[in-house]
Amino acid sequence: MTTYTMTEAKNDICAIIREAAGEEVLITRHGKPAAVVIGFADDDDWMEYRLLHDETFLRKIARAREQIRKGEFVTLEELPD
């Protein structure tokens, strides 16, 4: 992970955003972590990030997994045509 000071980030934010498409970039303020820049190579990366950080979606996944553990599900073969 590359690290930049707040001043460096302010002076070259475009380059940092481009760099963040390949890896997270840490921004520090007074030598301490202040922010992380996460870039996206394409729209799929952006959608994946949104899904992985959406509380409603994550709750639905957890609920579905619990139902599967309890045997409360229907297989594809059981669905009507």
Image (tube, rainbow, N blue to C red):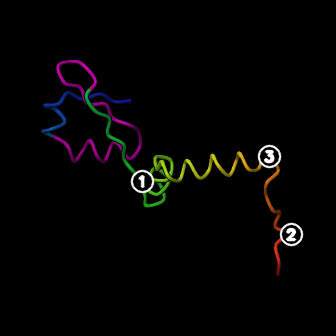
4 left or right of 78 in image: left
Q: In front: mark 3 or mark 1?
A: 3
Residue at the limit of the structure toward the top, as seen here: 31
Up-down: is 22 above or below 43?
A: above
- As measured in the structure, the alpha-carbon distance from the residue carrying label 2 to the one carrying label 1 is 40 Å
Q: Which residue is mark 2?
A: 78
Mark 2 or mark 1, whichever is nearer to me: 2
Residue at image location 28% in from the left, 24% down from the top: 33
Where residue 35 appears, as percent x and y from the top left, is: 28, 33
The residue labelled by disc 1 is: 41
Name which of mark 3 and mark 2 comes first in the sequence.
Answer: 3
Who's the residue at 16% across and 32% down the image? 8
Q: Which residues are magenta?
A: 12-33
User: Residue 12: x and y, percent?
Assistant: 17, 41
Residue 65 lies left or right of residue 79; in this view the side is left
Left or right: 75, with 66 as reference point: right
In magenta segment, residue 61: no
Q: Residue 74, located in which quarter of the rendered image?
A: bottom right
| Mark identifier at residue 70 | 3
Q: Amino acid at mark 3?
A: Lys
Count residues near mark 1 (Cα–Cα under 10 Å), then give few for <14, some for 14-19, many for 20+: few
- Quadrant location, the C terminus: bottom right
Please tell me whether mark 3 or mark 2 is closer to you in this view.
Answer: 3
Query: Neighbour class for label 3 at 10 Å: few (<14), some, many (≥20)?
Result: few
- Three-letter code, disc 1: Ala
Q: Does the magenta run of residues contain 27? A: yes
Instruction: Identify the element where label 2 is drawn.
Output: helix
Estimate the spatial distance between the alpha carbons at disc 3 and disc 1, rounded to whole Å.
39 Å
**In the rendered image of this protein, does residue 24 appear above or below residue 42?**
above
Going from N to C along the chain, the mark reached first, 2 or 1, is 1
Which numbered disc covers residue 62? none
